Image (spheres, helix red, strand yellow):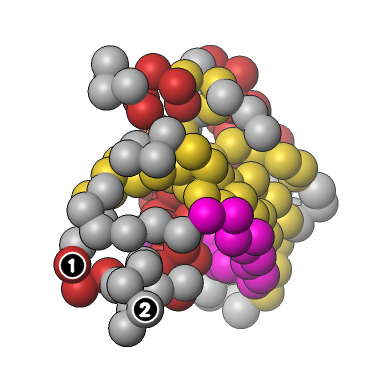
């Protein structure tokens, strides 16, 4: 698991996030992961890809391996980093960390494609976007341990 990543978001666990078994509902992990790749796009300078313009990145698959349950109250950290960029898709890696437990709660991957809404087709990811994503990936140096300690 990477401890230095380009994107980290913080979320407070709400009482209503819990399932009847008093841990966070598993479906929220997927929402958190999706929010983290959207944040990665914003930070990399490509907000237009998630704002309903002609070209959008659209989620085509997501997976999650649960390691430890998350309970209320807690602050969680969700990381996002590039795993792979191919012809027409990007794979992002995610980790969900519990601040109260100081531990990894889950990890997973999201696969997104570049979609042209005007012609209703998947498009090749252009070089300028690859370069922006690569720059953000390299320049991102947020340390998970520092976030967990509350130093950032």
**Residue span colored magenta:** 50-68
Q: Is residue 54 visible?
A: no
Tell me the SS state at disc 2.
Answer: loop
Q: Which of 91 and 33 is in front in this view?
A: 33
**Quadrant in which the C terminus appears:** top left
Q: Can residue 18 be seen in this view?
A: yes
Question: In the figure, residue 72 lies in which quadrant?
Answer: bottom left
Q: Which disc is residue 75 wearing?
A: none
On the image, the x and y values in percent for residue 57 come to 55, 60
Question: In the image, 83: left or right of 118?
Answer: right
Residue at 57 percent of width and 24 percent of height: 3
In the depicted structure, whether residue 68 falls above or below residue 128: below
In this figure, which residue is indicated by the disc labeled 2? 21
Task: Farthest residue to the right: give it.
Answer: 87
Q: Which of 80 and 1 is in front in this view?
A: 1
In this figure, which residue is indicated by the disc labeled 1? 15
Residue at 52 percent of width and 55 percent of height: 68
Question: Of marks 1 and 2, which one's residue comes earlier in the chain?
Answer: 1
9 within the magenta span = no
Dominant secondary structure of the residues highlighted in magenta in the image: strand
């Amino acid at each position: 698991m990477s401890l230095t990543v380009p994107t980290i978001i913080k979320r407070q666990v709400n009482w209503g996030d819990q399932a009847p078994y008093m841990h966070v509902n598993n479906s929220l992990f997927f929402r958190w992961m999706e929010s983290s790749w959207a944040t990665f796009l914003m930070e990399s300078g490509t907000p237009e890809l998630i704002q309903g313009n002609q070209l959008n990145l659209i989620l085509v698959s997501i997976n999650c391996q649960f390691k430890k349950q998350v309970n209320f109250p807690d602050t969680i950290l969700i990381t996002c980093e590039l795993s792979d960029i191919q012809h027409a898709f990007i794979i992002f890696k995610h980790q969900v960390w519990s601040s109260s437990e100081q531990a990894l709660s889950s990890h997973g991957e999201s696969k997104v494609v570049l979609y042209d809404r005007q012609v209703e087709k998947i498009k090749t990811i252009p070089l300028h976007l690859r370069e922006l994503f690569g720059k953000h990936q390299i320049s991102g140096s947020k340390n998970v341990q520092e976030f967990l300690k509350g130093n950032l």
